[in-house]
Image (cartoon, rainbow, N blue to C red):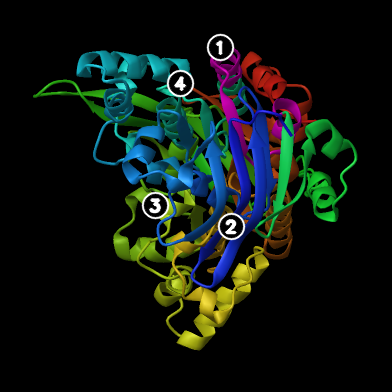
């Protein structure tokens, strides 16, 4: 433990009603130190970070939280507001819900600077654009005018990081800050945090499920299980000789190859999805009378045989999620053709499209914004059955929903099925989204970053479930991920996107072992993938 801690937490406990979710947590962080907090989804990591800033409404909080010698529990809400964002900043886990949908992202960053540093509006805006550029966002002056829904998941994540770093805080609470970032941008952000630490003595509490990141980037680690810290110490010591069985289990969990190589003659065999020369452009305001068109996808072609997985990789903003929506006919394309199970969804009438929707499902990137906050878990997972399987009675639908949730590693009691999404962790919500898509037993499943919010043990479990379902039912997957280890585990072929174009395409082993294009080589060099 550091001798003079900037943050000192003692016997922290958090209780919601009669349920204790965090108990007896001790944690010290010195200025300039990086401490990782790891553990499975639902272990209490995020709740502990929110408790430090007193951001838990309706919770009973106990213990001591001292920042630079001041007891935060005794401060008024007015004094806490002055500390939040200025001295202690937080990067929240789900940027789509943390960002205000009614304001451009540049305005949201500038607002932090106006409130805490009293910068004039023009100067704050200029600084906001500079911060976006530091985060690696191309054309930052234009992107600053965008609303959150107009950015990719990785770009929204970088906006959140820019907001947190705007006032150069002394302590940064980073809740899965690199989850939605590709490997090259992740390295850029981590290098930026290192530079800030060297210059300002920034202290960092790094909540993550990426153990490779913990090994390479942090000084000390605390392992949480069921609301308690079960092991803590220097990263090298804990990783080299873990003392607790739970820590050993986490360290042994790593994605490994789960599928066999695709047959060499399968390119034209039983195709369930074919796209040719896809072209997608987004309209942008170019004045009162005309619009400018920004190209997002250009000349994209792909084939997907039944029972196989096509991996799609590329940097944030390269068009991966747009490709998923275009394949399902969920957004308008300006050119090209799609053959999805024998039909082009863009040409079908709503009545004809409904049965196709049951056969081609999608798991969206941000589970919190894709799950209705006004519906219970049971209602969310059962919804597809209500529409497509009206012959099932309520009891049968509930049983099927519980069965499919158990299959993806989230067994819930009847009482838990009546809770709402906000009562669950990010990883648990991700599994709900996967279960909702699988419950209709589709033939094609498009997975947009399906394991990004999952801890390593559950990640491998979900990948194994997807591989088993594929073998049993001949499911075809389009797997979008920035994690090359996930692509290597489940994909048969891989498509590499860069600035809306395919720069490399081939069998997974061939592309990941011997990439031909410099961009693919750069992605592999920035990753921790070992083949």
Residue at 21% x, 16% y: name it: 120
The span picked out in magenta is: 191-218
Q: Earlier in the sequence, mark 3 or mark 2?
A: 2
Q: Nearer the viewer, mark 3 or mark 2?
A: 2
Which image quarter holds the N terminus?
Answer: top right
Whole-percent x and y of residue 513? 79, 26
Q: Earlier in the sequence, mark 1 or mark 4?
A: 4
Whole-percent x and y of residue 312? 59, 36
Disc 2 versus disc 1: distance between alpha carbons?
34 Å
Q: Which residue of the protein is positioned furthest toward the right in this rendering?
A: 241
Q: Which residue is mark 3?
A: 345
Q: Nearer the viewer, mark 3 or mark 1?
A: 1
Mark 3–mark 2 contact, CB under 8 Å?
no
Disc 3 versus disc 4: distance between alpha carbons?
48 Å
Q: Which residue is mark 1?
A: 199
Disc 3 versus disc 1: distance between alpha carbons?
54 Å
Badge number at residue 168: 4
Q: Which residue is mark 2?
A: 13
Q: Earlier in the sequence, mark 3 or mark 4?
A: 4
Whole-percent x and y of residue 400? 57, 78
Q: Nearer the viewer, mark 3 or mark 4?
A: 4
Q: Earlier in the sequence, mark 2 or mark 1?
A: 2
**Can you tell which quarter of the image residue 34 is in?**
top right
């Amino acid at each position: 433990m550091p001798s003079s801690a900037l943050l000192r937490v003692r016997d922290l406990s958090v209780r919601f009603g009669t349920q204790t979710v965090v108990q007896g947590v001790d944690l010290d962080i010195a200025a300039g130190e990086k401490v990782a907090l790891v553990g499975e989804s639902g272990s209490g990591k995020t709740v502990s970070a929110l408790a430090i800033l007193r951001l838990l409404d309706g919770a009973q909080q106990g213990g001591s939280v001292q920042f630079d010698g001041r007891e935060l529990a005794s401060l008024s809400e007015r004094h806490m507001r002055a500390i939040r964002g200025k001295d202690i900043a937080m990067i929240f886990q789900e940027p789509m819900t943390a960002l205000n949908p009614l304001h451009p992202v540049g305005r949201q960053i500038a607002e932090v600077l106006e409130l805490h540093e009293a910068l004039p509006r023009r100067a704050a805006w200029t600084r906001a654009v500079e911060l976006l550029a530091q985060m690696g966002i191309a054309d930052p002056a234009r992107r600053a005018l965008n609303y959150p829904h107009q950015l990719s998941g990785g770009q929204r994540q970088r906006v959140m990081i820019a907001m947190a770093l705007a006032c150069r805080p002394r302590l940064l609470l980073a809740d899965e800050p690199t989850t939605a970032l590709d490997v090259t941008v992740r390295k850029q952000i981590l290098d930026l945090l290192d530079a800030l630490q060297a210059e300002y003595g920034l202290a960092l509490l790094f909540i993550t499920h990426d153990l490779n990141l913990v090994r390479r980037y942090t000084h000390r680690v605390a392992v949480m299980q069921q609301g308690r810290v079960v092991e803590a110490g220097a990263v090298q010591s804990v990783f080299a000789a873990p003392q607790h069985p739970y820590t050993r289990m986490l360290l042994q969990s790593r994605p490994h190859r789960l599928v066999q190589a695709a047959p060499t003659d399968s390119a034209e065999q039983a195709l369930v999805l074919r796209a040719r020369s896809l072209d997608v452009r987004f309209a942008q305001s170019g004045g009162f009378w005309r619009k400018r068109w920004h190209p997002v996808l250009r000349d994209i072609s792909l084939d997907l045989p039944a029972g196989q997985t096509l991996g799609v990789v590329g940097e944030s903003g390269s068009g991966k999620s747009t490709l998923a929506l275009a394949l399902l006919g969920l957004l308008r394309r300006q050119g090209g053709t799609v053959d999805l199970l024998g039909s082009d969804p863009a040409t079908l009438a709503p009545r004809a499209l409904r049965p196709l929707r049951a056969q081609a499902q999608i798991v969206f990137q941000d589970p919190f914004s894709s799950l209705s906050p006004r519906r219970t878990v049971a209602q969310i997972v059962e919804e597809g059955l209500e529409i497509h399987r009206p012959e099932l009675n309520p009891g049968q639908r509930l049983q099927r929903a519980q069965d499919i949730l158990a299959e993806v590693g989230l067994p819930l009691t009847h009482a838990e099925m009546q809770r709402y999404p906000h009562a669950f962790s990010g990883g648990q919500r991700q599994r709900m989204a996967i279960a909702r898509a699988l419950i209709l037993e589709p033939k094609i499943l498009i997975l947009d970053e399906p394991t990004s919010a999952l801890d390593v043990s559950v990640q491998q479990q979900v990948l194994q479930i997807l591989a088993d379902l594929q073998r049993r039912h001949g499911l075809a997957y389009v797997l979008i991920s920035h994690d090359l280890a996930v692509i290597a585990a489940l994909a048969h072929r891989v498509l590499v996107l860069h600035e809306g174009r395919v720069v490399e395409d081939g069998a997974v082993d061939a592309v990941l072992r011997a990439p031909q294009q410099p961009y693919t080589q750069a992605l592999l060099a920035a990753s921790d993938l070992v083949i």
